[in-house]
Image: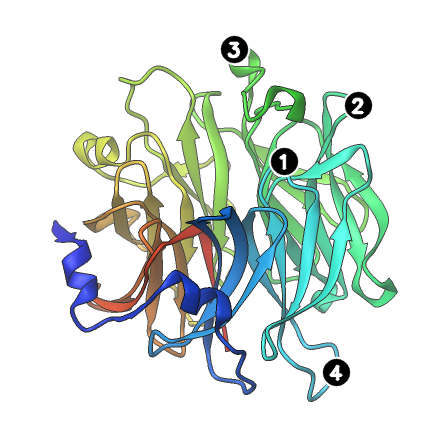
Amino acid sequence: MTAIDRRTFLLGSAGYSLAALMACAPETGHQARLLSGFQSLGKQGRKYGVAAIDLNGRLRFSLTLPQRLHQIITLPASHPGQSRECLAVARRPGTELYHIDVDRGQLLNTIRSPGNRHFFGHASCVEQGDYIVVPQNHLDEKASSIGIYDRKEAWALIDEIPLPTVGPHQLECLSDGKTLVVAMGGIHTHPESGRKKLNIDSMQSSLLYLDSGSGKVLDDFRPPDPKLSLRHLAITSDDHVIVGAQYQGDGETIWPLAYSHKGESSLQALSASQEVWRLHQQYIGSVSVEVGVESARFAYLSSPRGGVVSRWDLHSGECIEHRDIRDACGVAFSNVQHGFFISNGAGQMLKSEQNTGQVKALAYQQGIIWDNHLSFIM
């Protein structure tokens, strides 16, 4: 186990003040970028936004936005020569999606949920990016759905897929471009109660497979304890799903917090000692796997509560190592850069080498809290 502390990042890392972050001029071009939502605290109160960092640790743009963000998804180009674009999703119980030109650092559109819906912080592309699917909570009933938004029709909500239970969180699409895998957290919330969980005694989480065209449920797999709320997932290029959990039971029970699935009849727990799982403090905040490689081997799990990022072997399902990184949550893989990138709530970003796991500092943004998820765009 290796501790990564603030001093490590300040040595050899570029440091930017809050003023520099908010005033940074955008740069055009197609250099690789890391994208994340952020929070900052200043004399005028708390601010939210999205920012891009290059692979030299330099800030390339920042945008202040009205609502706190969760996940940033990259959008496939709709025509040759188009600027790179992303969609920033507001954190639960947010009601906005922000369509952003990454190359110019400009807000293109704001997409708002219907008045009786809110988002859960995640979205995914289907049908080569022509449509965006977004988990939604229904405010007028104890129900949830996946909203389908049409990119070609100015992001109009064109359909909704009803879900069998509540609390959908992260979802991704399999390689066929149509089958959705949804981490159904199973937790009912309502904005009138803040972020309070209203059904812990009766909750039931699952990993749901469904057809995005028909809305048909194809499969539904439950964790070994109904209070293991499946929240975040990642999928390799050959459709190997890794899903992370956040345990809602008592503070002493130790369950495996991540599960594998690739055609089996049940979820397969990743293997680690109880001590390793205890370090994760019943909470997985982000999951990342190798994509774009012939046979993915590595997965990363983050636990901001535990201040731990763990590295896993997908072939054996076993934990390889874990590192202490304070308040680390965002994790993103780049095949081109041969590594996993990590962000935390202390304004730090780092890179973990793909094959060795060796960690080095990339950037430090003073006064900035990077939000829970990190994305990579070429």
Secondary structure, mark 3, is: helix
Asked whether residue 290 appears in the rendered view, the answer is no
Is disc 2 placed on a helix, strand or loop? loop
Sequence-earlier tag: 3 or 4 = 4
Whole-number angstrom distance, CA of label 3 to CA of label 2: 22 Å
* Alpha carbon separation for disc pair 1 and 2: 14 Å
Label located before the other in sequence (1 or 4): 4
Numbered label attached to residue 79 = 4
How far apart are labels 3 and 4 at the CA level? 49 Å
Q: Which residue is mark 1?
A: 93
Q: Amino acid at mark 1?
A: Pro
Q: Callout 3: few (<14), some (14-19), or many (20+) C-alpha neighbours within 10 Å?
A: few
| Between discs 3 and 2, the one toward the N terminus | 2
Q: In the picture provided, is 279 more to the left or to the right than 266?
A: left
Around disc 1, counting alpha carbons within 10 Å, would you say few (fewer than 14), some (14 to 19), or many (20 or more)? many
**What amino acid does circle 2 point to?**
Asp
Marker disc for residue 213:
none
Q: Is residue 246 above or below residue 100?
A: above
Camera-near label (1 vs 3) is 1
Q: Which of the marked residues, 1 or 3, is nearer the chain's N terminus?
A: 1
- Label 3 vs label 2, nearer the camera: 2
Q: Is residue 246 left or right of residue 366?
A: right
Q: How many marks?
A: 4
The answer to whether 170 is drawn above or below residue 201 in the figure is below
Amino acid tagged 4: His
Q: Is residue 32 visible?
A: yes
Residue marked by disc 2: 140
- How far across and how far down the image is residue 167, in percent? 61, 30
Q: What is the C-alpha distance between the residues marked 1 and 3?
A: 22 Å
- Residue at image position (29%, 31%) is 281
